[in-house]
């Protein structure tokens, strides 16, 4: 059994399941659905994003890649499976903001304004997030206890 991401809610489900256990999405439909990825904005690392665009979109011309990044939103690629689209999104994150959309054969322009579908929630990241929050809370409690102790003495 392998785990795949549900294209509807982004959570992990078994590839053997007929429907998503989280949201009820019929997973057999996921095989037929196509997705596209849109580059919305850059957080940082302009040169790095241009390089990623060249590498992932197989654009030889450096200036053509720059031109794409300079005119956002830009359609990166269309007609992908959900997992392919997620994989491509990972290459651009976290240095850029990307939008995953369903590709139902709209025009390229139509895809730019199409409604976003969620990217997978990484369970590992969630755990790390809680771990970090817990550490911060422990430090705050520790400092508070120390101050309390000193004020008593
Ligand atoms: Zn789901």
Image (cartoon, rainbow, N blue to C red):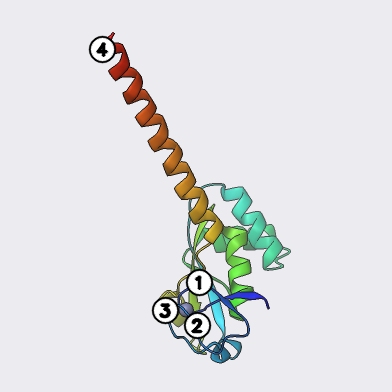
| Mark 1 residue crowding within 10 angstroms, few (<14) / some (14–19) / many (20+) | many
Residue at 45% over, 37% down: 135
Q: CA distance from mark 1 to mark 4?
A: 50 Å
Q: CA distance from mark 1 to mark 3?
A: 21 Å
Secondary structure under the numbered disc 2 in the rendered image: loop
Q: CA distance from mark 1 to mark 2?
A: 9 Å
Tell me the residue that label 4 is attached to: 152
Decide if ligand 1 comes within 8 Å of the CB at mark 2. yes
Establish if 32 lies above or below 66.
Answer: below
Secondary structure under the numbered disc 3 in the rendered image: loop
Establish if 46 lies above or below 27.
Answer: above
Decide if ligand 1 comes within 8 Å of the CB at mark 3. no
Figure quadrant of the C terminus: top left
Q: CA distance from mark 4 to mark 3?
A: 62 Å
Q: Which quarter of the figure has residue 91?
A: bottom right
Q: Disc 1 vs disc 2: Cβ atoms closer than 8 Å? A: yes
Which comes before the other along the chain, label 3 or label 2?
2
User: Where in the figure is residue 66, as x and y percent of width and height?
Assistant: 60, 57
Tell me the residue that label 3 is attached to: 114
Secondary structure under the numbered disc 4 in the rendered image: helix
Which comes before the other along the chain, label 4 or label 2?
2
User: Where in the figure is residue 46, as x and y percent of width and height?
Assistant: 56, 49
Decide if ligand 1 comes within 8 Å of the CB at mark 1. yes
Tell me the residue that label 2 is attached to: 20
Residue at 52% over, 78% down: 6
Toward the top, the furthest residue is: 153
Would you say 62 lies left or right of 96 here?
A: right
Which comes before the other along the chain, label 1 or label 2?
1
| Mark 4 residue crowding within 10 angstroms, few (<14) / some (14–19) / many (20+) | few
Tell me the residue that label 1 is attached to: 11
């Amino acid at each position: 059994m392998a785990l795949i991401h549900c294209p509807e809610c982004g959570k992990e489900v078994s590839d053997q399941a007929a429907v998503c256990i989280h949201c009820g999405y019929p997973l057999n439909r996921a095989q037929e659905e196509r997705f596209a990825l849109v580059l919305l904005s850059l957080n940082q690392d302009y040169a790095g994003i241009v390089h990623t665009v060249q590498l992932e979109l197989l654009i030889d011309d450096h200036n053509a890649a720059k031109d794409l990044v300079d005119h956002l939103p830009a359609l990166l690629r269309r007609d992908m499976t959900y997992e392919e689209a997620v994989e491509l999104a990972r290459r651009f994150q976290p240095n850029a903001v990307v939008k995953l959309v369903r590709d139902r054969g709209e025009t390229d322009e139509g895809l730019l304004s199409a409604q976003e579908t969620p990217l997978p929630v990484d369970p590992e990241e969630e755990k790390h997030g809680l771990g970090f929050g817990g550490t911060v809370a422990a430090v705050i409690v520790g400092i508070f206890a120390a101050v309390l102790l000193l004020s008593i003495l």
